[in-house]
Amino acid sequence: MILDFRYHIVTLVAVFLALGIGIIIGSALMGNDAIVNQQREITDRLEAQLQEIRTENQAVQSKLNEMEVDITIQQQFEKQVLPALVEGKLVDQTIAIIETNNYGLRDNLLNTLETAGAKVSSITTILNGLNMGNDKDEIVTNLGLDNGEKEDVIKQLSKALAEGIASGEKQVVLNTLSQAGMIKSVGEYGMPLDAVIVVGGSTDKSLVRTNIIDELIINYFLEHDIPVYGVEESNIAYSYMKEYQKFNISTVDNIETVPGQLALVYAMAGRHGHYGEKSTANRLLPTLDNLGVVNGNEL
């Protein structure tokens, strides 16, 4: 809206200049006072319009300032209330986090999980969609995979990666992919897991590979009776929520926000559903009442 006002102001200034030139030329050539008076009347009307636009612009700016203050207060409130709402909800749960696109995991999500009592045993970040470049044949040979089309090899890598995260028995896969710059890995692998959080969504269409990465990973853990929770940020260009929901897992589409992190914790504590702001969500938040007992702990 402010841009519209600026556009109108620039337009009016241009009109003023044109009128000024017109007045000068008209006076010099015609010598007609009527033309000059007419030009001045038009100028007066334009000045009044310009003043009206200035007044409206000031009102809009004032409203925006008020909204910014309200948003700041709301954010401060959310940050102060969140710890009290999640504290102890995930005590004794060991969690692995897998990022299938490397737009960055926010520290506040890790802080929220820690406050809830969970232990994040490992964080694995898949880089560039497991793109092997010219190293495909070498990777296939080193890992003893079936050679074939790139997509088939990536499927094998995705499953092997999930197995390595869960059991620790595929350490050679983790090491090989790390050395090839295809993943980043932090933490301890092979620990018994209570849940896995898959962070998806993409800002790059060429990296949307849910059918050969995300789905293979999710399916592996579900087959081994390890709950999976699919999340993404609200502002990503390509959402994975529909693909994740095919597996009947809980999803959160605004994980960078306080409501999103609250929804994730409650989903992991038993309030299963699809939460967030997008059309794929059923509601913003789960019911925030007493959840009873999770892992033997009173909530």
Image: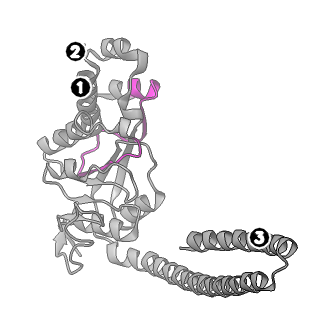
Q: Nearer the viewer, residue 148 or 35?
A: 35
Residue 205 lies left or right of residue 192; in this view the side is right
Q: Which mark is residue 17?
A: 3
Above-or-below relation of 107 to 266: above
Which one is earlier in the sequence, the residue at label 2 or at label 3? Answer: 3
| Residue assigned mark 1 | 156
Between the C-alphas of marks 3 and 1, the distance is: 70 Å
**Do residues under tags 1 and 2 come within 8 Å of each other at their CB atoms?**
yes
Assess whether mark 3 and mark 2 are in contact (beta carbons under 8 angstroms): no
Q: Amino acid at mark 2?
A: Asp
The relative height of residue 120 versus residue 138 in the rendered view (above or below) is below
Q: What residue range appears in magenta?
A: 175-204
Give the crowd class for mark 2: few <14, some 14-19, many >=20 residues within 10 Å.
few
Q: Is residue 90 visible?
A: no
Q: Which image quarter holds the C terminus?
A: bottom left
Towards the viewer: 168 or 174: 174
Tell whether position 123 is magenta.
no
